[in-house]
């Protein structure tokens, strides 16, 4: 963002799941209304930025602040819609750290998050709505114009069975059998990718076998140290975005 | 680590700041003694792994468990000493997240951590001993054989003035003026590097100016989204280790 942009850019940025058109008023749900009216103490006439994943970023003026609802008037588009690279992150949810992984993955520009239940994983349930709310918050903060989808959880077999054709699955193989990233990544074309990061205890023998048998799976390593699952997710996403994603673009 | 290695590898791994020699008993300080005796409930004859940053990893047998001290008998070397790549991380300490950055940086193999106080940073003090203790814990968990040094904090001007000759400083330039990593990294030789990651509010104008004026500083970007300072540190470390570090090695 350059300095001219910073001047018109409001500090508050909200994901509002409605179509935008100039002066077509939008009444916010109670959570966002409360946030604007009571937490941020916005008043009529204040400006905020809004995005919906489709219509770009808009400047919106606060048209009305009522007890339980805030009404916005979209004013004008200030940024064209641009979606994040088509990069999925499949990950084993980690006790107390799933939200951290979601936050970091959104900042690093994933387009979808796929919770995977593995044999050695401790966490056996995910609250998709809660994860989506975290993803929204991270998207609002990092300036992206879309919010990644949160897929239904699956085990490794179901993940592989439902994996879409034409999407390569880069699999963080902590056993040491994978390719070296600096050799692997520059040899891959731009396209649709997924990254799979296992749980703290690693994958089980049969999960390893299933993964290695799938033609669309490419195992890779991340060096000699044992990375925690959340570190591994961030490290893999960063490496892939740097080479196959959108890191050539400026903020 | 292969399966044969896993069999002789004890689950407990401690950094013990003493020279190791076979059967030269080592009496542990109270903190580690308490951990082994009371937390892990070790008994005489149990095996643990120890490292000191110099003598490789040793198998050690617990020779005595007393009320306030545990004595170890180093048995034999099970892994040759290998130091992490010569990569420093200079970072602005972040409220409630400095420990997370230290943990991740140790896992990702930094050789030194340099707290930097910047104009826009909120945190104005660091407890070096506490950070070193965190670094030790992370080193124990991730399997590395050395613990990074924690340098005295400095401001940007002092950091640049004291920067050693022959070490390139890769500087995460959130203003968008930096080089693209996938172009920059493959063009750099193996060697001594540092990474500098700024605070949440970014560097000030005069800090930017100082950084850009130094010949050994190479600014780089990490794409269009705004990364939190802790995400930026992990993402930059991962990218640099993948290309210039030791990610060709196996666990």
Image (tube, coloured by chain):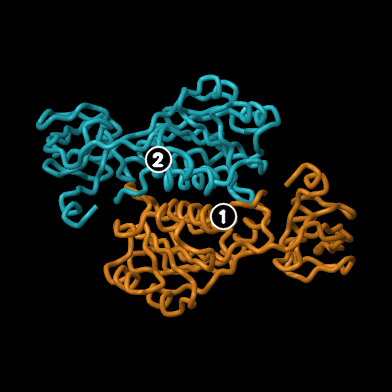
Chain colours: A cyan, B orange
- Under circle 1, the secondary element is loop
Compared across the picture, whether B224 is left or right of A120 comes to left
Q: Residue A37 placed where, x, y %?
A: 22, 40
In the image, what residue occupies the spot 68% across and 31% down? A204
The residue depicted at 56 percent of the width and 58 percent of the height is B245
- Quarter-of-image position of residue A110: top left
Q: Residue furthest bottom?
A: B161
Q: Using the numbered discs, state the Cα–Cα distance from disc 1 to disc 2 in whole angstroms.
A: 21 Å
Q: Nearer the viewer, residue B105 or A42?
A: B105
Q: Residues within 10 Å of mark 2 (few under 14, many from 20)?
A: many
Q: For this rendering, which residue is in front, A196 or B120?
A: A196
The label on residue A101 is: none
Splitting the image into 4 quarters, where does residue B177 fall?
bottom left
Q: Dot 1 corresponds to which residue?
A: B108
> Residue at coordinates 64% horizontally, 49% vertically from top-left?
A226
Q: Residue A142 location in percent, x, y?
A: 33, 46
Query: In the image, which disc is placed on residue A106?
Result: 2
Which type of secondary structure does the marked residue at label 2 adopt?
Answer: helix
The vertical placement of A63 against B97, above or below, is above
At label 1, counting other C-alpha atoms closer than 10 Å, the crowd grade (few under 14, some 14-19, many 20 or more) is many
Picture coordinates of residue A161 (x, y %)? Answer: 55, 20
Q: Nearer the viewer, residue A10 or A145?
A: A145
> Is B129 placed left or right of B206 in the picture?
right
Q: In this rendering, does residue A53 appear at all?
A: yes
Q: Foreground mark, 1 or 2? A: 1
Q: Is residue B53 above or below residue B138?
A: below
Number of numbered discs: 2
């Amino acid at each position: 963002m350059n300095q001219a942009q910073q001047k018109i850019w409001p500090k508050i940025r909200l994901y509002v799941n409605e179509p935008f058109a100039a002066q077509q008023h939008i009444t916010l749900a109670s959570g966002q209304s409360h946030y604007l009216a009571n937490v941020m103490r916005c008043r009529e006439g204040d400006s905020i930025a809004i995005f919906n994943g489709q219509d770009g970023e808009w400047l919106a003026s606060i048209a009305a602040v009522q007890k339980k609802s805030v009404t916005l008037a979209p004013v004008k588009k200030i940024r064209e819609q641009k979606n994040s690279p088509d990069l999925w992150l499949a990950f084993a949810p980690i006790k107390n750290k799933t939200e951290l992984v979601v936050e970091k993955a959104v900042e690093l520009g994933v387009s979808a998050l796929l919770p995977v239940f593995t044999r050695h994983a401790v966490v056996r349930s995910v609250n998709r709505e809660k994860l989506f709310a975290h993803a929204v918050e991270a998207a609002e903060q990092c300036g992206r114009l879309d919010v990644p989808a949160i897929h239904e959880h699956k085990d490794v077999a179901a993940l592989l069975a439902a994996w879409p054709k034409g999407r390569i699955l880069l699999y963080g193989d902590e056993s040491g059998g994978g390719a070296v990233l600096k050799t692997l990544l520059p040899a891959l074309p731009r396209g649709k990718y997924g990254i799979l990061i296992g749980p703290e205890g690693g994958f089980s023998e049969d999960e390893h076998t299933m993964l290695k048998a799938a033609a669309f799976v490419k195992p890779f390593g991340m060096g000699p140290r044992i990375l925690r699952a959340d570190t591994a997710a961030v490290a893999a996403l960063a490496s892939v975005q740097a080479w196959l994603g959108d890191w050539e673009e400026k903020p």
